[in-house]
Structure formats: structure tokens, C-alpha cells
Image (spheres, rainbow, N blue to C red):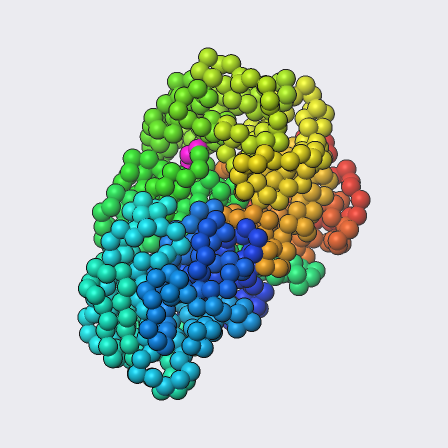
């Protein structure tokens, strides 16, 4: 595929489309989520770009997973790559730091204080004035190239830019190289070990002024200094191109993406790219606050997965080999345990043009590694989190008819991934669950995540006519029934003989070694693939509903060593972590959609704000915001794949998104307000619609979904025949 041709053809059309739309970027506040535990990226990028260039702060730790937290007032450099909204830190690669005098080449020595009052961030642009030297730093970006501009207030022949390959967010430097090519140009690479066990990134840097003096102790030393002659108020610009495959490919990326030096033009282009992507959903709200939260959430959602290939298609495979001229866009930063729940179902609605590349990337990872990814970062399998979360994502793409990839290859990838013997899968395939007396912790969570992965694979098996596999996988997916302890009505661990762990000392508000980032209260509901089967485990539907009601009422402290991700608590419901995200919508399954409406609105109103601590948990690479976006539209896909979207309580006045080149789906709410949060009736394409769910296939036909709201619960969708 000629990727350059496609880029050039698409760009004018994108500009024409965007020019007819409102400036949605003005609603985005990238500082939302920079306090608390949001862990969001702050800096300059374009949607799903390889480059996420911005400040890396002096402090490190859990709240500095992205390299930035609002509470810190010292910057050690401006690095080209950062994560956004993760629960673990990495990257912070290849930092530049402007100085006016000799400084100690260490993290503390490079650090300069700054004030938020002299900091500005917009989509595609970041600037700050460093207290040391009063130097103004500005950054903008294309997908693979960052453009830095450092303005020095005093004339000097000793204005320096430090190239720092040592300090990063939290990883360890393994090997580096930086060397001068000519008076304007340097190049090199950085190999590190951290969350990604072996991350390699190559760079090619051009300066706008000749290097007056190049100070380096040698190509393998992780620091170097480029010195420039500048007059008062003059700037030095630096173009930093990245590549996963080599320095010369980084050079090619620069030549094709950023041949010139027009900082303002690059900044405007980056902002226009954001405005175009945000315009995928044209939504109006009753308040500016709701618009800011929604479009900032869409901005965070669109940061990743990130492009991880060169302009001409070369990329570093999961097996450490370089693959040339790929005919698809390779992606990285796959936080699948988080994102299979809402971010990927949202993508199937508004990012249809990217889904084939998503599928191709996942299949190639399997071909290169022998299994589907769990949490994939920069060509590395990190094995972070539990289950086989790529399977529901890939299944969703298969069931929704995404074209352009080999469905049988996708199914083979699922089969081989489930047949492996690592991470408790050998016990899953022999016992039907992960027991608590083998060398596997978090056995309840692992088992529940595997059950929904097996169910997902069974759907594809059935679609392909693989009847025996479909029957076997479906049977395994029902294993959640064995973990349900009717004595206490929670999911609890079994030993290899099938006996429950002792109830001595059992506290459902405590996180133990059996659960991942959650407690028994949060994990009893993790059967999104078979909600009615879960309901049947209780003495009656009323008993299930009473248990669900209790989730939001019961008070109880977490144990001292519980995971800090268990946040955003309403009773024992924890919205700050993903296993809870579908739970509010379970009331629709028992004919009580008004309870879903009330709780969904409460979460949107209380746990998402337009302040710096506006997220109640980690952004988790778009999942936290995707929940809000879908819920604001009045939709949520409870089952992990297949396309049944449960209806909630739309926050939008109206919202439209394209489902095909010639088709649009529009959602409207009538009579809604802060009090009128309950659905009174619904119409689909002008006809009464009594169901509290809608299918993906109906949405893809285009049309109009109208909600009529009330300040009192109604009898809409309360009869069993209208429930999901």
C-alpha cells in the first residue's frame, strides 16, 4: 500500500470536512485528570500518534505513570514519548532540556522549577517558561515527529540543549547511542527495560541553527550537549523524528512528515487534526461543563492505541524482527483488560475506518508470538493484568463484520491463545477454572476473565461452523457457576478438588490474593456474557436485585493493602476500576431501567468533572472516558462483544456520528434536565421502541433514536420481553 499517497489524498478531504464543523478543540481541557489518580498525558501530539512529546517531571512514582502530575513543580526534560492514563509507568524516552549554563548531568541537576501560571496546553501544543534561565519551551507534533522551540531571553554563545537518554518515567536504560552527523544533525537510539522488557526507539534530530559546540563523552554516554549562538529573544528549534526500526527510517519520517520549520503551521495542522477527529461525534449539551467533559474524554480516548510503524510501513514486530512495507497500520499501547469493556465497543461505532488495522495488528502479534496480546507495549508483551482480553476485542470485530482481515486466522489465534499453558490456562483446560492451590494468584479474577474469553471464542466458532469448538468453549464459559458460593452469594476461589476456600475471616469488602484490583463485592457481577445465567444463581430475580441494590449502599473500609485502583466508590461499587463498569446497566436485565438511569447520571455528575482531578481513577488508555462517552450517548455494550447496546440515560441533547459514508446515526433526548433523567419512551426512526437495548446492526443502518425524558420513573421497558 502506498501510505504516502493515502495520507495526501485524505488530508484535503479532512480539512474540508473540519472547516464546516464547530471548533470542538475549544472544549478540550488536557489538564482534566492531571491531579488525583488520572495519570493522563500532558504535552503535544496528534490523534493516535507515535509521538507524545511533553514534560517529564522530577518526581517519579505511581501518580507519575505519564511523567506528569499537577502537584509537581519541577521538570527534568521534554521527552518524546509518554503513556496516558495507565496504572504503571514507562517511556519518557529521549528528552531535551534547554539551559543557559553548565548543569550537573543528573535527574536532580537537570530539574528546573516552573509555575502552572506560565504553562499552556491545548490539543497539539504545549508551552511552559522554565524558572531557571527564564527559557520558554514550546512543543507541537505530527504523528512521528516532535517540533520543539526554545526561546532564550538573553543573547549568548552558550545556549545549550541537553540530550538526555538516561532519565525517563520509570524504566532502566540498557543501551544508548547519540552522535553528531553534521553541524545541524544528531541521531541515535535508546534501548530500555521496564514495563516493556525490551523497548527500542531510534531518533533523528535536526536543529534550526548550527551546533556551535558538541559536548559528548562518546556515542554510548547517555548525555550530550549541543551549544548554540543566539541573540536576545531568539529561538532554537529542534525536529525530533522517531522510528521503531532505525535511525534512517526516523530520518525518512521527518522528511515526509515535517520537511520545513514553520512552527505555527505545524501547530495549526495538529490542532486541525484533533478537531477533525473530535468531529466524528457532533454532540450538543445543556451546559458548557458537559461539553468540556465529553470532548476532553473523547480527546483522551483518541490518544491510543498509538501508531507504531514508519511512514512507509516498516515496523518492529513482537518477535523483535523488522517487517517492511506493511499494508496495514501497526499499533501499540493495547491496554486490553481495560479497553475491551467500553473503548473498543465505542471504536466500532465511531472509528470504523481504523478497525481493520486493529484486527491486523492483533493477528500479526499472534503470528509473531504464538498468542494474542494481553497488555502490549512497544512490540513487547508485558503480561500485565489477567485473562485473554484480546479475544473479546477480536471477536467483536468478527461479529460486527469488519472487513479486510482473515476471520479464520483470527479464530485460530483465539484457539491457540486459549490452548497455552501459562497464566493458569493449563488448569482452565483441565479443571475448568484456576484453582487457589497452584502457583497462580488472583485465581477468581483470572477464571472469570477466562470464562468470558471462552464465551467470546465460542461465538466466532459458531459463526464459522466449528460446532464442536463452540459447544466446548460455551461449556467452559459456564464455569462461573462453580465459583458462585450460595452461602454468601459471592464468587469465591476453589482448590483443585473443587472445595471453596474457608470462610474464616472472609470479608467481602477486602481485597485478597484471589482478586485483581477488586473485592468480592465487585467481582460477583463479572459475568457480562451471561447476565441471565448469573441471575439464575440467586434464589430469585428479586434476590439478585436486592443484592445489586446493596452494592451501592453497603459501607465498609478496604483493607490496608488493597490496590489503590479501587476508587470512585459508591457503596462498594468502584467506578474508578474497570470490572465495575458494566454493573450499572444490569438493572435493565431485570426490568428496572430507571435504576440504571439514576445511577448512570450520578456517576456522570459526581465522578466526572471539568477540574484537574476530574477523573475518579486512572484514565486507563481511554476506557474511563469511553464509559462516559457511551453513557452520555445513552448506550453501553454490557456483553463484551456482539453488539447489544443497553440503553441508559442520555446526557446529550443531540449527537450524530457517521456509520457509513452516506449514513448517519442521530441520538436526541427531549425534555431532559438535571432532574428529568428517566426515560419515559423511546422512538427509533419515528416508531415507538419499547426495548431497553439496541443492536449494533440497527445502529449501522443509520437513522434516529429519540429519548423522551421525565423527572419520574416510568414503566418503559419494564416487561421481560423488552429487556436485554
- Place of residue 275 in the rendered image (x, y in percent of width and height, measured from the top left): 51, 65
Which image quadrant: the C terminus?
top right
**Boundaries of the magenta span:** 387-391
Kindly tell me whether residue 140 is visible in this rendering: yes
Left of 55 or right of it: where is 215? left
Left of 674 or right of it: where is 535? left
Farthest residue, direction right: 712
Left of 52 or right of it: where is 211? left
Residue occupying the point 24% across, 77% down: 213
Q: Is residue 598 above or below residue 480?
A: below
Whether the magenta-drawn stretch holds residue 636 is answered as no
Residue occupying the point 22% across, 47% down: 321
- Place of residue 117 in the rendered image (x, y in percent of width and height, measured from the top left): 56, 71
Front residue of this view, candidates 409 and 463: 409
Farthest residue, direction top: 497
Residue occupying the point 34% across, 70% down: 103
Front residue of this view, candidates 669 and 57: 57
- Place of residue 578 in the rendered image (x, y in percent of width and height, measured from the top left): 54, 41
Residue occupying the point 68% across, 57% down: 653
Which image quadrant: the N terminus?
bottom left
Q: Quadrant of residue 527?
A: top right
Kindly tell me whether residue 273 is visible in this rendering: no
- Place of residue 540 in the rendered image (x, y in percent of width and height, measured from the top left): 69, 21
Amino acid at each position: 500500500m502506498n501510505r504516502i499517497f493515502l495520507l495526501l489524498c485524505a488530508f484535503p478531504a479532512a480539512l474540508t470536512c473540519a472547516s464546516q464543523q464547530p471548533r470542538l478543540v475549544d472544549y478540550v481541557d488536557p489538564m482534566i485528570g492531571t491531579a488525583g489518580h488520572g495519570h493522563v498525558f500532558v504535552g503535544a501530539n496528534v490523534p493516535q500518534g507515535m509521538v507524545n512529546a511533553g514534560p517529564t517531571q522530577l518526581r517519579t512514582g505511581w501518580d507519575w505513570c505519564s511523567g506528569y502530575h499537577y502537584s509537581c513543580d519541577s521538570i527534568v526534560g521534554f521527552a518524546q514519548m509518554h503513556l496516558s492514563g495507565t496504572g504503571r509507568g514507562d517511556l519518557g524516552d529521549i528528552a531535551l532540556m534547554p539551559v543557559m549554563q553548565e548543569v550537573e548531568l543528573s535527574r536532580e541537576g537537570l530539574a528546573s522549577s516552573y509555575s502552572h501560571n506560565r504553562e499552556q496546553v491545548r490539543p497539539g501544543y504545549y508551552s511552559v517558561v522554565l524558572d531557571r534561565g527564564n527559557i520558554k519551551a514550546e512543543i507541537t507534533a505530527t504523528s512521528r515527529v516532535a517540533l520543539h522551540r526554545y526561546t532564550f531571553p538573553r543573547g549568548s554563545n552558550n545556549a545549550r540543549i541537553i540530550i538526555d537518554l538516561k532519565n525517563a518515567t520509570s524504566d532502566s536504560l540498557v543501551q544508548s547511542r547519540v552522535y553528531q552527523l553534521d553541524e545541524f544533525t544528531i541521531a541515535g537510539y535508546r534501548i530500555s527495560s521496564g514495563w516493556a522488557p525490551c523497548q527500542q526507539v531510534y531518533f533523528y534530530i535536526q536543529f534550526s541553527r548550527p551546533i556551535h559546540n558538541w559536548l559528548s563523552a562518546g556515542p554510548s554516554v547517555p548525555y550530550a550537549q549541543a551549544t548554540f549562538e543566539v541573540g536576545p529573544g531568539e529561538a532554537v528549534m529542534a525536529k525530533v523524528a522517531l522510528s521503531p526500526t532505525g535511525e534512517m527510517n526516523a530520518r525518512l519520517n521527518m522528511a515526509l512528515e515535517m520537511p520545513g520549520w514553520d512552527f505555527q503551521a505545524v501547530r495549526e495542522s495538529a490542532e486541525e487534526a484533533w478537531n477533525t477527529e473530535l468531529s466524528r461525534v457532533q454532540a450538543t449539551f445543556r451546559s458548557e461543563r458537559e461539553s468540556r467533559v465529553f470532548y476532553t474524554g473523547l480527546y483522551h480516548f483518541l490518544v491510543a492505541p498509538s501508531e507504531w510503524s514508519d511512514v512507509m510501513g516498516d515496523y518492529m514486530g513482537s518477535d523483535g524482527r523488522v517487517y517492511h512495507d506493511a499494508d496495514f497500520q501497526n499499533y501499540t499501547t493495547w491496554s486490553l483488560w481495560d479497553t475491551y469493556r467500553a473503548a473498543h465497543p465505542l471504536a466500532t461505532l465511531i472509528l470504523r475506518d481504523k478497525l481493520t488495522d486493529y484486527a491486523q495488528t492483533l493477528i500479526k502479534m499472534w503470528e509473531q508470538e504464538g498468542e494474542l496480546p494481553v497488555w502490549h507495549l512497544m512490540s513487547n508483551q508485558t503480561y500485565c493484568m489477567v485473562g485473554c482480553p484480546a479475544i473479546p476485542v477480536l471477536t467483536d470485530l468478527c461479529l460486527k463484520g469488519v472487513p479486510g482481515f482473515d476471520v479464520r486466522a483470527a479464530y485460530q489465534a483465539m484457539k491457540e491463545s486459549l490452548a497455552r499453558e501459562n497464566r493458569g490456562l493449563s488448569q482452565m483446560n483441565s479443571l475448568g477454572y484456576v484453582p487457589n492451590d497452584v502457583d497462580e494468584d488472583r485465581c477468581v479474577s483470572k477464571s472469570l476473565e477466562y470464562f468470558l474469553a471462552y464465551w467470546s471464542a465460542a461465538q466466532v466458532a459458531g459463526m464459522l461452523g466449528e460446532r464442536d469448538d463452540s459447544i466446548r468453549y460455551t461449556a467452559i464459559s459456564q464455569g462461573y457457576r462453580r465459583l458462585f458460593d450460595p452461602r454468601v452469594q459471592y464468587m469465591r476461589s476453589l482448590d483443585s478438588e473443587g472445595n471453596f476456600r474457608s470462610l474464616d475471616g472472609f470479608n467481602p469488602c477486602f481485597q485478597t490474593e484471589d482478586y485483581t484490583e477488586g473485592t468480592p463485592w465487585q467481582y460477583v457481577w463479572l459475568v457480562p456474557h451471561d447476565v441471565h445465567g448469573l441471575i439464575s444463581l440467586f434464589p430469585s430475580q428479586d434476590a439478585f436485585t436486592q443484592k445489586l441494590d446493596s452494592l451501592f449502599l453497603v459501607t465498609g473500609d478496604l483493607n490496608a493493602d488493597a490496590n489503590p485502583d479501587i476508587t470512585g466508590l459508591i457503596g462498594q461499587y468502584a467506578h474508578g476500576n474497570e470490572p465495575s463498569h458494566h454493573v450499572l446497566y444490569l438493572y435493565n436485565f431485570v426490568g428496572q431501567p430507571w435504576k440504571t438511569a439514576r445511577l448512570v447520571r450520578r456517576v456522570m455528575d459526581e465522578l466526572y468533572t471539568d477540574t484537574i482531578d476530574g477523573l475518579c481513577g486512572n484514565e486507563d488508555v481511554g476506557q474511563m472516558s469511553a464509559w462516559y462517552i457511551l453513557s452520555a450517548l445513552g448506550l453501553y455494550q454490557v456483553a463484551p462483544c456482539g453488539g447489544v447496546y443497553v440503553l441508559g440515560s442520555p446526557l446529550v441533547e443531540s449527537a450524530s456520528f457517521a456509520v457509513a459514508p452516506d449514513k448517519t446515526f442521530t441520538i436526541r433526548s427531549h425534555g431532559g434536565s438535571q432532574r428529568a433523567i428517566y426515560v419515559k419512551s423511546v422512538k427509533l426512526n419515528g416508531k415507538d421502541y419499547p426495548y431497553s437495548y439496541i443492536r449494533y446492526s440497527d445502529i449501522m443502518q443509520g437513522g434516529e433514536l429519540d429519548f423522551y425524558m421525565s423527572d419520574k420513573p416510568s414503566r418503559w421497558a419494564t416487561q421481560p420481553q423488552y429487556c436485554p
